[in-house]
Image (cartoon, grey):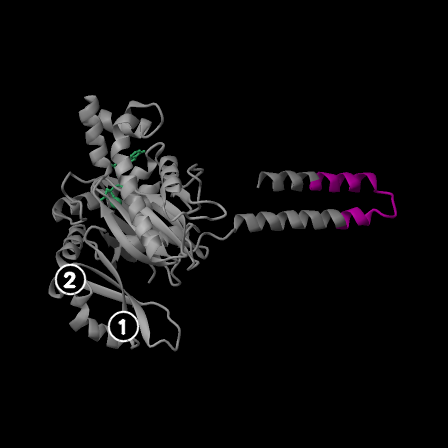
Amino acid sequence: MGVVFVIGMAGGAAFFEYLFYLQDSPYRYYPSVVGLGGLLAFALTLAVIKHRRLPRPPEGSWRGVGLGLDFGGAALKAVLLGAQKGGVVVLAAGQEPLPPGTVDADGLVTRPREAGEAARRLLRRIGPKKAHRVVTTVGNGSAVIRLAQFPRMSREELGEALRWEGGQHIPIPLEQAVLDFSILESPRDASQMTVFLAAAPRRVAEALVSSLRLCHLRPYALDLEPNCALRALTYASLAEEGSAAAWAVLDLGASSTKLTLFDGAVPQITRTLNLGGQALTELLGRELGLDPSQAEDKKRQEGLLEGTSARAVLWPQLEELFMEVRRSLEYFLIQRRGVRLRRVFLLGGGASLPGLAPSLQKYLETGLATRVETENGLEVIVASLDSSGNWNERSPRSKRNRVASLGPEYFIALGSALRGD
Ligand SMILES: Nc1ncnc2c1ncn2[C@@H]1O[C@H](COP(=O)(O)OP(=O)(O)OP(=O)(O)O)[C@@H](O)[C@H]1O
Ligand SMILES: [Mg+2]
């Protein structure tokens, strides 16, 4: 932008200088034409920069205002999005702490009243006047995803079949579950089709709905964390669309860590690992004799940085977590011979732990038995966006917007808000 401005100014100055010196020359009109052309090009460039396309929502039809809510073990996160100039921008975002135990490690809202009150406080603070769609997520610990083969049939026929046979595919008794599905693309002449099944215990869904009712919100949809992560990363132009590339999301939350493996745009498997940020803070407090807020500060300042006392305490726990992540990745890659693992995205508040991303990168690169050779190597990326939804390499540059930047803990709420009509 600055460069265009300087070039434009210089062009304009040169133009007027020419006019001044060539007043009596028979060629005096030439510089005018060239100069005018230059100024026009300058103005056009400025207009293009100003109206540069805003990031678009991944799902075709998206209008109005969308509100995404993520009830986590530590905090409720909200992201409010609005349609603008053919794209979507973040209008507001915020989080409100949830009293311990309000949401358990499986993502079940055990105290809907507290959750609803927190939502009311948060919404009053970030101020959405009206949201067309309110979408919240079912925690990974409760949700079930499955890929299943069915004989080719219509959507209606499949819905009917699942009403009777759905229980064979999910580990929850059918009468206690909410179940949804989508048919994945397959060759026209194939006799079988692959179906993506998503399910959650009914009581988990009902607890979320009653939390929202308490603040007079009616959910448009309940979604799954992997779908939301995919949507948010696609919006940020980060997700791998090619089916030959596998990638993973590691969401480091307060009460647990969630690993999801994707093949192209389809989540394949998801695992919940027990270690969360809260346990790390408690461990630091115990080992170094610090109170909870001192321990939290120390964790955020030192994390896994070499030579710090925090690293000495945290590394054994995190190494165990990394080992579990590696095992899951290996298991997946061995089953899909030939599939390459390109990227691991780190989401959740724990992704901001200093030194975590490079330590995980090193650990995975040297350890993966099914070595993944790519031109760029395996990338471990901490997700972060500026308030217009642009990928910002973790350096927020927001100016007038109300939200300075969206850290990795907002990605699930962002992906919920991005859900289309
Ligand atoms: N800068 C930071 N460095 C290290 N840890 C951080 C940082 N910021 C936040 N955290 C940790 O992130 C955790 C909260 O993350 P997040 O909001 O994603 O969790 P949650 O969604 O509420 O929990 P869960 O997904 O387990 O239900 C806390 O444990 C907090 O200590
Ligand atoms: Mg979370």
Q: In the picture provided, is 168 more to the left or to the right than 299? A: left
On the picture, is 59 further left or further right than 105? Answer: right
User: At x 23% / y 26%, what residue is drawn?
Assistant: 295
Task: Give the mark nearer the N terminus: 1 vs 2.
Answer: 1
In the picture, the quarter occupied by the N terminus is top right
Q: From what the image shows, is residue 94 above or below residue 235?
A: above
- Quadrant in which residue 149 is drawn: bottom left
Taking the image in four quarters, ligand 2 sits in the one at: top left
Image position of 14 with respect to 221: above or below = above
Residue 297: x, y in percent?
A: 27, 27
Is residue 34 or residue 284 the one in the foreground? 284
Q: Is residue 66 visible?
A: no
Res 2 visible: yes
Q: Check disc 2 and give the amino acid type.
A: Ala
Mark 2 secondary-structure assignment: strand
Amino acid beneath label 1: Phe
Q: Is mark 2 within 8 Å of ligand 1?
A: no
2 left or right of 359? right
Q: Quadrant of the C terminus?
A: bottom left
Q: Write down the region rendered in magenta.
A: 11-33
Give coordinates of residue 94: x percent, y percent: 29, 42
Q: Observer-nearest residue: 170 or 231?
A: 170
